[in-house]
Image (tube, helix red, strand yellow):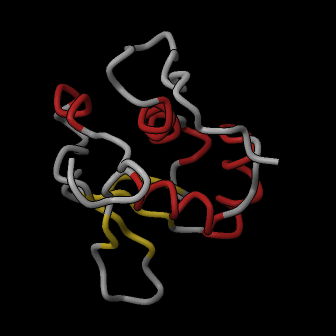
Amino acid sequence: EMPSMGRKSIDDDDDSPLIPAFITKLVKILADPDCSGVFQYGPDGNTIQVLEGQQFASKVLPKYFKHSNLASFVRQLNLYGFHKSSQDADLCEFQHRHFRRDRPELLRNIRRKTAGGGGS
């Protein structure tokens, strides 16, 4: 079952209280040499790419997220404002204006969308 996303902060990762745990994990995965070739930054560092969906789901996701469901991972990306950046069906590539390889100071601007939408 999914842990409830209640008011208790899920971002009490040690790294920074201001950066959501999910985003911190993305950065960790991208820095993990075992994951290169499976999940990595695009050539310009402004996108992230899942190159080997099956391998990513079976090896990387369980290591970082306790599940192996690529669709759940993509849903998380969407919740945090990432958008699919390629029309190529074979390329699973996403971008977020505040998620860039060489701009870690922008990460604190990434926020999970609140349920329900509408208003702020």
Residue 46 percent coordinates (x, y): 21, 54
**In which quarter of the view is residue 79 placed?**
bottom left
Tell me where residue 43 sits by quadrant. bottom left
Q: Nearer the viewer, residue 96 or 92?
A: 96
Residue at 35% of width from left, 26% of height from top? 19
Nearer-the-camera pick, 119 or 51? 119
x, y percent for residue 47: 28, 58
Residue at position x 50%, y 54% in the image: 76
Q: Residue furthest top?
A: 14
Total numbered circles: 0
Q: Is residue 51 left or right of residue 43?
A: right
Q: Is residue 42 visible?
A: no
Drawn side of residue 53 relative to residue 99, left or right: right
- Taking the view exactly as shown, the residue that stands out farthest to the front is 119
Residue 5, position as x, y percentages in the image: 59, 38
The relative height of residue 30 versus residue 93 in the rendered view (above or below) is above
Q: Position of residue 58 (x, y in %)?
A: 77, 58
Identify the residue shown where x is 24% and y is 55%: 96
- The residue at 54%/26% (across/down) is 10
